[in-house]
Amino acid sequence: MRILMKVSIPVEDGNKAVRAGKLGETIKAILDEQKPESVYFTAENGKRTGLLFLHMQDSAEIPKYAEPWFLAFNAEIEMEPVMTPEDLANGSPAFESAVKKYG
């Protein structure tokens, strides 16, 4: 299952990592280990934020992805399932079934 994991780094923890010269290298080390399908960075609600698209086989993998960010940056994590256009097309029978039953 594809998961969007949002990683928000508190300003002070991020600033501490920047001042120590560790922000970039720590992020790179985590990403090299996690190998997301894609990753983007932005500022959201005043925090350094990463948007990682991951593929998980099982929810037991959540700690594997979340803990490095928690420990390295005191980050806030949000996860939610996402679909590709192909996934959406494969799910179309569920739409039809729901329409017949509830629509």
Image: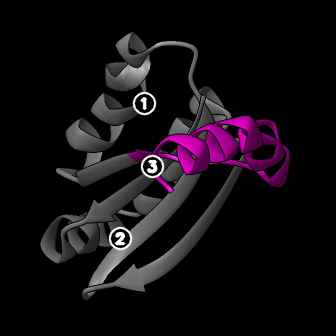
Residue found at x 32% / y 43%: 69
**The magenta stretch spans residue 94:** yes
| Visible residue check, residue 97 | yes
Under tag 3, what secondary structure?
A: helix
User: Which labelled disc corresponds to residue 102?
Assistant: 3
- Density class for disc 3 (Cα within 10 Å; few <14, some 14-19, many ≥20) is few
Where residue 74 appears, as percent x and y from the top left, is 17, 50
Residue found at x 69% / y 44%: 96
- Density class for disc 2 (Cα within 10 Å; few <14, some 14-19, many ≥20) is few
User: Which labelled disc corresponds to residue 18?
Assistant: 2
Under tag 2, what secondary structure?
A: helix
Q: Amino acid at mark 1?
A: Tyr
36, above or below 76, in the image: above
Label 1 and label 2: CA atoms lie apart by 22 Å
Prevailing SS of the magenta stretch: helix
Where residue 7 appears, as percent x and y from the top left, is 36, 56
Under tag 1, what secondary structure?
A: helix
Residue found at x 74% / y 48%: 88
Label 3 and label 1: CA atoms lie apart by 37 Å
Tell me the mark number nearer the camera, choosing from 1 and 2.
1
Tell me the mark number nearer the camera, choosing from 3 and 1.
3
**The magenta stretch spans residue 63:** no
Q: Give residue 71's quadrant in the image.
A: top left
